[in-house]
Amino acid sequence: MHQLTIAEIIRGLRDKQFSSVELTSHYLERIQQLDNQFNSFITVTSEQALKEAAAADARLAQGDAPALCGVPVAHKDIFCTNGVRTSCGSKMLDNFVPPYDATVIDNFQRAGAISLGKTNMDEFAMGSSNETSFYGAVKNPWNVERIPGGSSGGSAAAVAALLAPGATATDTGGSIRQPAAMTGTTGLKPTYGRVSRWGMIAFASSLDQGGPITRTAEDATLMLSVMASPDAKDSTCLDRPVQDYTAHLNDSIAGLKIGVPSEYFGEGLDSEVGARVQDALKEYEKLGAELVEISLPHSKLAVPAYYVIAPAEASANLSRFDGVRYGYRCENPADLRDLYMRSRGEGFGEEVKRRILVGSYALSAGYYDAYYNKAQQVRRLIKQDFVDAFDKVDVIMGPTAPNPAFKLGEKNADPVAMYLEDIYTIATNLAGLPGMSIPCGFAHGLPVGLQIIGNYLDEARMLNVAHQFQQASDWHQQTAPAAE
Amino acid sequence: MEWEVVIGLEVHVQLATQSKIFSGASTAFGAAPNTQACAVDLAMPGTLPVPNEEAFRFAVMFGLAMNAEIGKRSVFERKNYFYPDLPKGYQTTQLEQPIVGEGQIEIHLEDGSSKTVRLHHAHLEEDAGKSLHEDFHGMSGIDLNRAGTPLIEIVSEPDMRSAAEAVAYLKKIHSIVTYLGISDGDMSQGSLRCDANVSVRLKGEEELGTRTEIKNLNSFRFIEKAIKVEAQRQIDLIEDGGKVVQETRLYDADKNETRSMRSKEVANDYRYFPCPDLLPVVLSDEYIEQVRGDLPELPDAKCARFEKEYGLSAYDADQLTQERSTANYFEQVAAKSGEAKLAANWVMGELAALLNREEKSIEQSPVNAEHLAGLIARIKDGTISSKIAKQVFEAMANGDGDADTVIEAKGLKQVSDTGAIEKLVDDVIAASSAQVENYRNADPDKRPKMMGFFVGQIMKASKGQANPQMINKVLKEKLDALL
Amino acid sequence: MAVDAQTIEKLAELARIAISEETIDEVSSRLGDVLQLVDQLQAVNTDGVEPMAHPLDEVQVLRQDAVTEPNQREAFLALAPQSEAGLYLVPKVID
C-alpha cells in the first residue's frame, strides 16, 4: 500500500479498495518500525491521525469527500499545529504547543487530509544537511550514512522511505529542492507569496515559501492545489486565484523553450551529476523541447547576497524567542539581561546563533550600506537576470545541487562549504521565482535532481514540464532500498 | 550673557482606532491585563502583521491638517532592541519613508503673538506594552494589552524658544488631533505623550548646543516645568565651566529636577531595516483628496469664522476654538440664545470657572448648552438682570432645572412694573433726606454720579430684582422734580 | 579572516546571546569565514540600483478596522515560563 502515489490513493479510497483507517494505520506502523533508522519524524500523532481517518472514511462513505479526503501526509515541524508540539527543530521550542494552526495546516484539514505527524528539520530551517536539528540528524534512506539534505530533510526522507506519500516542506534557499534531489523525490517551491506564511515559523520572511515534497509531479500538483491560497492574514501572500494546476499536466511540451544557464554547469559541479542533468536535457529534446543556452551573469553572487539578507531578516525574526512568553527559559536568571543572554545562548544551536550574529553584523551601524543594502541591490541584479532570460525561454533547467548526498558530518566544520550546497537554488528565492527538483538518475549510486525554474506564477507549466518527463522516465519510481 | 533655549518635541499620539495597528485585538483602555493581547501582539511564532486601514486614514488626516506632504509610498521598518514590553524584539515603525513628511503649523502665544513651527515628519508605529513595577516576588509583571496600539510620532524641528512655546505647540497638536477625532488626546491615560529635546546657546549663536532628551512627559504642566528646569540645569552647567552630555533624561516631578536615564544609554544600535513581513503602502491622489474632502473644520479656520460670523475678538475666538468640544458648546449656546457675545462671555467666564472648580470637562458640564442658552435668553428679554443670572446659573449647576424653572421657583423675576418701581423709589427718597439735600445743592455736572447711591439702595430694597433701566428713569424724574 | 573578540562581544550583546569564553575563538573564526564569503559583494558595481526588499513588486493590502480577536489569555499564558495574576513575569525591569 505504501508504494501508492497520492493520485492512486485518492482513487483507491474512492473505489473502496481500502479505507483511510487501513491506510493510515499502515503508514503509522511503518513509521514505528522503520523510522528509527532515519529519524525523519519529531512527533508522530497516531491517535489523532486514526481519529481523523475514521472521520474521513465516514465522509467518503457519504460521498462528500474533499480533494485529499483520507490521504495521510506529514508536516514539516515548522508549521504550527493547534494542540501538537511545534518545535522548529529547536530546543527553544521543545515545549511549545501552539493554540493555533498555520494556514497551510488549515488548508490540508479542510481538504480532508490526515496528519501523520511532524517531520524533522534543520533548526529554524537553517541548514542544508539536516544535522542542526535539536532532535538529531536525519539519515538518507538511500544510504543511512549520508545526509538527506536540508532543511526539509525529515519531509524528504519520510517520502523517500515511503513513510508518508507526501509531506509539506519549506524553502528559503533550497530547503525543498535540495533534499528532494538528494532523496530522489519531487519537490516544489512555489512563487513567493503563493502559499501563506501564516503560522509557518519565519526564518527569512522575504525568502521563505512553503511547498510539497512528493514522489511524482502529479502528486505535487495535488498537494500544491491544497497548499496554495490567498490569505488575508499574510500581507505578502498573493491575493490572486490559484490556477488549476491539473488542467495542463498532460499538455504536450513540443516547442517548449528550455533555458540552460552556462553558469550552472561550471566549476564545483560533480561531473556525474552534470552528466545526469545533460541526459535529462537530451530526454527533453526527444519530447520536442528546444534547448537555448542562456546566461545568468550574476549567479555567483547569489550565495553571498543570500548570506547577508537571510541572516539579517532572521536576526530580527528570532528576537521573539526571549524566554518571556513561551519556549525555553534558562534556570534561575540573575537579572533581565541574564534571562535573555542565557535563554537564547542555551536555547539556540550553533548554526542559528552564527546566523543571528552575522545578520546583526550586516545591519549594524556602519555596515548597513556595505552589507545589507548592497545585498539588496545585488538581489535586484539577480532578479533582472531571470526576467531577461524569461523573455527568451519558458523554463530554465540545471542541476538542483552540485553533488549528491554527502556523508554525515562531512561539511559540519565548514559552514561556507555547507552554504555552497545551495549555489543553484538560492537565486530563485532571491528573485521569488518558483522552482522544482525532480529525480533524473543516479551519480555514485545516489539520486540526482534536475532543477526546473519557472516564471512568476507559472507553476502549472512547471508541473506540466515535470510530469511529461516523468511520463517518459522512471527515475521517480525508484525506491530506496531501506524503504522496502 | 543672555541664553536662548532651543526645543524640539517628539509627540506620541495614540490613534483612536477600534483595533490595533497590526492585529484585530481591541485597543480599549483599562481592560484586565493581557486580555487584549492576541497571538500577533504576543509575537507568537509564525504570526504575521496586517496593517489597519483606519490608522493610515487617521495619519493622512493629521498630515493634511499640518499642511504636510503625504507619503504616497510609505514603508515600515523594524527597530531592533530587547525589552520585555516589546514582544517581537523589534518595534515596527517608519524611518526612511514615513506617512507624513514636512509641514508646518501656527502656534498662538499668551501675549497674542503667533509663530510658525515646522514639522520634520510624522510616522506610524506600534506602541509597546507595560511593565508593572509592583513586586511579584522581586519580579516585574508584563501586560501587553497596549502592545500594538497605533501611534503617530510627530517630530518637530527645533523651532521653539521657550517652555511656553513648547506648551503652546503641544496644545495646538492636542487641539488638532482631537478636532480630527483621531485621538481622545487623554494625557492621563497616555494617549498623548511627549519627549522634549532641549539645548541652550548664547543668543545670536548660529550653532545648536548639545541637546538632552527628556522622556515621557505626560501633562502640559510637567512639560513646562521639565523644560524650564532642564534648560536652567544646562545653563548652570555651562556657566560653571561644564559641558552638556547628549543623553536621555527623566523628569522627577516630586523633586522638580531631571535625572540621567543611564539604563537607556548602553550603546543602542537599532539596526533598522525594511520589515519583510509588510509591503510598501501606496496611497493614490484620489484617496488623499477624498480624505481631505472629509476633514472637519480645523481650529484656525474655526477661529477665523468665529471672529467673522459672531463678531468676537481674536482673543475670544481663539480661546473658544482651542478645544473642539468648547467650540461646539459655544455654537449651540449662541444659536439657541441668538446672543453670540453674551454666549462667549458666559462660556469663558462663569462656565469655565464652574468647570475648573469642579474639575470637569465641558462634556461633563452640569449646565448643558440648552440650559445656558435659556438663561441668556432671559437676560436678553429683561426677565432677569445679569446679576440675578449668576444666581440662576449656580442653581442650574446644582441641578435645580432650567433657567425658567429656577426663576419661577425662586421668584427671581425682574420687577419692571412702573407702580412697584415708583414705590421703591419713593421709599428710598423718603428715607434719605440728607442725600436728597446734597443732591439738590450739588453742581449739576456732579448729579449723575450721585444717583448711584440711590440706585444701590433701591436695588438692595428690591433684592436685586428691580429693572435697573427703569429705576434709573423713574429715579431721575423724581429727583429732578425735587429741584 | 577572523572577527576580533570585541566585535563578537558587541554582536552578542546586541543579539542577547551568551557566548562562552571557550568558544569565542571558534565563533570568531567561523564568522570571519562567512564575512569573507559575503565580501564578494563589495566588488560589484551597484551604482543606481534600487535595493530590493521584496521579490515581487506588490503593494500592501490594508485591513478594515474591526476587532476580530477574542480574549484567549489563558491559552497563551499557559505557554509562559512564569506568570501570575494574568501577567508575564520577568526579572525586575529597571528604568
Image: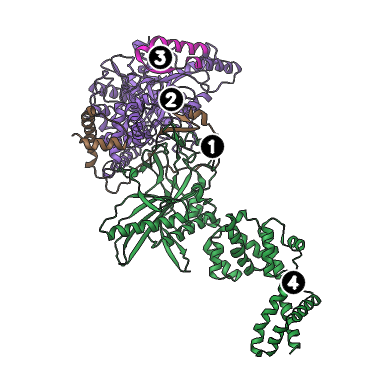
Chain colours: A purple, B green, C brown
- Residue behind mark 3: A162
Is residue A194 visible in this depiction of the protein?
no
What residue span does the magenta drawing correspond to? A21-49
Q: Earlier in the sequence, mark 2 or mark 3?
A: 2
User: Which residue is disc 2 drawn over?
Assistant: A96
Residue flagged by tag 3: what amino acid is it? Answer: Leu
Q: Residue at x 44, y 12 (%)?
A: A2
| Relative side of B170 to B356, left or right | left
**A168 or B157: which is nearer to us?**
B157
Q: Secondary structure at mark 1?
A: loop
Identified by mark 1, the residue type is Ala
Query: What subunit carries mark 1?
Result: B
- Closer to the camera: disc 3 or disc 4? 4
> Mark 1 vs mark 3: same chain?
no
- In whole angstroms, how far apart are the C-alphas of marks 1 and 4? 60 Å
Image point 53% across, 46% down: which residue?
B17
Front residue (pair A450, B322): B322
- Pick whichever, A275 or A189, lies toward us: A189
Label 4 is placed on what type of residue? Ser
Residue B156 picture location, percent across and down: 40, 57
Mark 4 and 2 residues: CB-CB less than 8 Å, in contact?
A: no
- Chain of the residue on which disc 3 is drawn: A
Mark before the other along the chain sequence, 1 or 4: 1
Q: Nearer the viewer, residue A151 or B473?
A: B473
